[in-house]
Image (spheres, coloured by chain):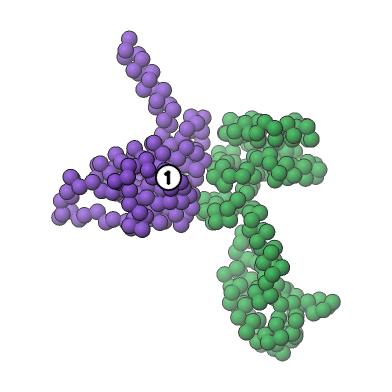
Amino acid sequence: MYVVIVGGGKVGYYLAKDLLARGHEVTIIERDERKCHRIQDDFGSIVLEGECSTDLMEQAGASRADVFIAVTGEDETNLVLSQIAKRFFQIPKAIARVVNPKNRKTFNQLGIDLTVSATEIITTLIEQEMATQEILPLVSLGRGKLEIVEIHLPIDSPALKKTVQQLSLPEDSILISIIRGDQIIVPRGDTVFRPNDTVLALTATASAEKLKTFFYP
Amino acid sequence: MKAIVLGCGRVGAHLANSLVEHGHHVTVMDREPKAFRMLGDDLMIEHSDAAPHRSAGPGTPRAKTVRQKIACVLGLGIDEDVLRQAGIEEADAFAAVTDSDYTNIMACLMAKEIFRVPRVIARISEPKREKIFHQLGLETICPSILGAQSVFDLLLKAK
């Protein structure tokens, strides 16, 4: 695969390192001279120095790239360059880093649907560690429309002693498995919930809140 | 017309003043509170008063002698909430004239594609980037090229 990366900071550097190790072809575009030298010293001549422009992208062979990744520290730059990659160079996949999680929605609205936000990832991980009475989102799928969630049943859960069938969950939610101690149970219609069960479910993100009412008092 | 000017530097402040002089409603946005001083003290109003003014109906002639004040909104120009606060949903025109080209492009894309503002113009500093703007379907103005052109014209005229 040929990957063009804009931004040779920590994210760009380690991304390139990983991709190269997996045998992919990589070009990094970076404006800072020192960062360019560092990349060149470590990985050879895979770096183009300069403010990323259409000319520089052309020089990087953007039109034959399979993936374009914008990971500078500036959301505006990442957005605009991803737009150019998609609209002008018609690169099949453009991934943008979002520094301010608030901008993710804007990126999506403007047609950049593949975004990565370190802030959001860290926040989610911390929330997973902290929350007890919440539905924990584990994985986001289908561009955020679906998620796999984890639910810990408290001892006063309204689902207790009921069967899966009796619970009649929302139509756009489905149970994947129940973890009971060391046991992993594939839920059937007649499976009964017990306190301290951990339930894994696949749900439409919009219905996650509704799902909560079935398991928490 | 209701216009929003993003960036209250020399270009933004001058543009806002000119628009107001011609009787338009103007809201200026900047992330730096001090920037609004460029407008001149007597012209600023707090953003709490910045609710979109409805222009007078056809029956009421507008008093041209009274200068409309300029509404100021503090915040990032690429923040949807701040743009809404500036009244972008009712705006007829949007001009992004900050000194950051990418901020201008992103803000203009938002104005055009998310908020459907009828008239959107971006300033760019680096002439090479003009191509990018055009590829994204944006109307642009490049002061460096305009300046060079004016000097060029004057030099030739002087001969």
Where B158 falls versus A139 (above or below)? Answer: above
Q: Is residue A20 left or right of residue A7?
A: right
Q: For mark 1, what is the residue?
A: B34
Q: Is residue A25 left or right of residue B126?
A: right
Determine if residue B116 is in view. no
Point 20% across, 47% down: residue: B66
Point 62% across, 31% down: residue: A50
Under circle 1, the secondary element is: helix
Chain in purple, by letter, is B
- Return the residue nearer the eye: A90 or B26: B26
The amino acid pointed to by label 1 is: Lys
Chain in green, by letter, is A
User: Farthest right residue?
Assistant: A182
User: Farthest top residue?
Assistant: B159
Q: Is residue A94 left or right of residue B151?
A: right
Point 34% across, 39% down: residue: B15
Where A175 falls versus B10 (above or below)? Answer: below
Determine if residue B43 is in view. yes
Task: Give the percent coordinates (x, y) of residue A196.
Answer: 75, 81
Where B76 falls versus A174 (above or below)? Answer: above
- Return the residue nearer the eye: A121 or A57: A121
Residue B59 picture quarter? bottom left
Q: Dot 1 surroundings within 10 Å: few (below 14), some, or many (20 or more)?
A: few
Task: Give the percent coordinates (x, y) of residue B75.
Answer: 46, 51
Task: Give the percent coordinates (x, y) of residue A8.
Answer: 68, 39
Q: Is residue B102 left or right of residue A115?
A: left
Please state the chain letter of the residue tagged with numbered disc 1 in the rendered image: B
- Return the residue nearer the eye: A82 or B43: B43
Residue B137 picture quarter? top left
Point 66% across, 54% down: residue: A118
The C terminus of chain B is located in which quarter? top left
